[in-house]
Image (cartoon, grey):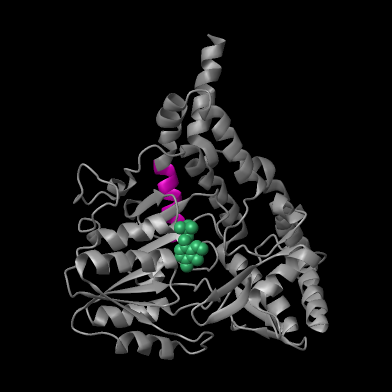
């Protein structure tokens, strides 16, 4: 009898998961966060005291290597890691019961909380595995005819460009790609370039909210407003913006939005989200077959076969973590970190930045080079001699090393980067 009671209690705790009073965020981080918050607001504290508590919440802050490629994929705070481990251990006791019957109950509350974070209706949110899946669903699901035109850029994400090129090959659509030379500190220049490419056959504009190669923030709302005047729909790739910039999806005035959750939201690896404006859901066919492909139910996009609900459910703790910091504070902090190292780096002879330092045009990501070295050589030198992990971006008209701090990056970490750049530049 007792065993059975504890079994039911356990099952209830699993299905409440991150959204119950005993969430791992509450257990592991909430007390410290509250204390840090009071430091921030009190006379004795400094912002660095507050951020040191956030840094402590990430095991990655103590890694043997300094991770400055958070634009690729980000680590999770401890609460998310432990949640995932616990869900996995529970599922291992019998996945067909614990995962499909118990954890499954957490899917709708999770949808609600994601929707809250995104500022949209839960019936417009599908949970999936990454930004590629979300955006490919929209790209392949759209009813487009031979000759219909789509406008993107040469610096959108390859997986999305491949998808549009496949539609070109199979359906005869026309895929136009604008060429931008970033950084550009003028929204009108960007909006005009899209507008000039429009013809009576243009049906879609595809925008990458933050260009992954060099970190340019695109003026999505202005482009959407312009596009809608021409009766054109807008798809936004928000892989780098969701969980980083302080916005709600309706602020963008777009029609479709896809994002990863394993970048700036710090959710487990293999998590993503798709948002489709309610009145457009019916016309988008799911990527994986559904019994009711023309339904208005967003869940038709979740017929993904067996996948880990453990990974999905741990997203909840990442949302708790995000909300405890607050999107505005997070955006400002990460911008501050980028500005901290970027503004000092450009003073080192031979070091160049390839990204605007202004908050309107970039946040976390910035490109850097050292005269006389290829990006690959610089990336290698940073790792070999300083244990700093970055990534070389050599693609089309981009050639730099991408540096991306996150909330768990400390000023001491960035001082180490600056010393490394100075030392490397002196030796060239
Ligand atoms: C702009 C952009 N879009 C989409 C993606 C793909 O994200 P995912 O790996 O979650 O599919 C990335 C990955 O880095 C990206 O930079």
- Measured from the top left, where is residue 97 in percent x and y? 43, 24
Q: Residue at x 62, y 43 (%)?
A: 81
Q: Residue at x 62, y 51 (%)?
A: 76
What secondary structure characterizes most of the magenta part?
Answer: helix
Q: Is residue 347 above or below residue 248?
A: below
Residue 364 visible to an observer of this rendering: no
Image x and y of residue 387, in percent = 77, 62
Find residue 13 and report its horizontal and vertical position in percent. Answer: 53, 30
Front position in the image: 60 or 113: 60
**Residue drawn at the location 68% of the way across and 78% of the way down:** 339
Q: In the figure, is residue 363 to the left or right of 340? A: left
Q: Is residue 185 visible?
A: yes
Magenta segment, which residues?
108-118
Query: Image quadrant for the C terminus?
Result: bottom right
Image-quadrant location for residue 170? bottom left
Q: Is residue 345 left or right of residue 267?
A: right
User: Is 341 in front, or is 368?
Assistant: 368
Let me know if residue 146 is in the magenta part. no
> Where, by quadrant of the figure, is residue 336 drawn?
bottom right
The residue closer to the viewer here, 181 or 121, is: 181
Task: Find residue 312 and report its horizontal and vertical position in percent.
Answer: 48, 43
Above or below residue 336? Residue 181 is: below
115 falls in the magenta region: yes
> For this view, does 231 lie left or right of residue 363?
left
Which residue is more in the foreground, 129 or 145? 145
Furthest-top residue in this view: 1
Where 355 falls versus 328 (above or below)? below
Answer left or right for 173 relative to 124.
left
Q: Is residue 117 above or below residue 245?
A: above
Residue that appears at 57% across and 58% down: 73
């Amino acid at each position: 009898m007792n065993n059975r009671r504890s079994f039911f209690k356990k099952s209830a705790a699993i299905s409440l998961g991150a959204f119950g009073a005993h969430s791992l965020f509450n257990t592991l981080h909430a007390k410290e966060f509250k204390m840090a918050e009071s430091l921030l607001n009190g006379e004795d504290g400094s912002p660095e005291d507050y951020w040191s508590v956030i840094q402590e919440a990430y095991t990655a802050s103590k890694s043997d290597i300094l991770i400055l490629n958070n634009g690729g994929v980000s680590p999770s705070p401890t609460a998310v890691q432990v949640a995932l481990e616990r869900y996995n251990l529970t599922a291992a006791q019998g996945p067909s019961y614990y995962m499909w019957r118990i954890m499954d109950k957490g899917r709708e509350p999770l949808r609600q909380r994601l929707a809250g974070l995104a500022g949209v209706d839960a019936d417009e949110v599908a949970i999936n595995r990454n930004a590629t899946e979300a955006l490919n669903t929209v790209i392949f699901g759209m009813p487009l005819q031979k000759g219909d035109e789509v406008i993107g850029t040469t610096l959108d994400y390859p997986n999305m460009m491949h998808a549009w090129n496949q539609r070109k090959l199979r359906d005869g659509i026309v895929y136009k790609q604008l060429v931008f030379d970033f950084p550009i500190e003028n929204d009108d220049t960007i909006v005009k370039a899209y507008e000039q490419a429009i013809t009576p056959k243009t049906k879609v504009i595809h925008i990458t909210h933050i260009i992954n190669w060099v970190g340019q923030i695109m003026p999505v709302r202005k482009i959407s407003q312009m596009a809608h005047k021409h009766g054109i729909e807008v798809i936004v790739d928000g892989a780098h913006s969701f969980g980083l910039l302080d916005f709600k999806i309706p602020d963008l005035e777009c029609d479709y939005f896809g994002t990863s959750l394993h970048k700036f939201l710090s959710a487990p690896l293999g998590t993503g989200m798709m948002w489709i404006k309610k009145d457009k859901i019916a016309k988008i066919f799911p990527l994986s077959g559904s019994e009711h492909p023309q339904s208005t139910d967003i869940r038709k996009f979740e017929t993904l076969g067996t996948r880990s609900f453990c990974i999905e459910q741990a997203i909840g703790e990442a949302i708790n973590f995000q909300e405890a910091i607050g999107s505005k504070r997070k955006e400002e902090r990460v911008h501050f970190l980028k500005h901290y190292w970027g503004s000092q780096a450009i003073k080192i002879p031979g070091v160049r930045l390839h990204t605007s330092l202004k908050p309107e045009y970039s946040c976390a990501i910035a490109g850097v080079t050292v005269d006389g070295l290829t990006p690959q050589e610089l990336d290698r030198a940073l790792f070999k001699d300083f244990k700093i992990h970055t990534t070389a971006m050599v693609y089309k008209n981009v050639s730099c090393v991408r540096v991306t701090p996150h909330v768990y990056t400390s000023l001491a970490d960035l001082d180490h980067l600056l010393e490394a750049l100075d030392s490397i530049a002196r030796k060239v």
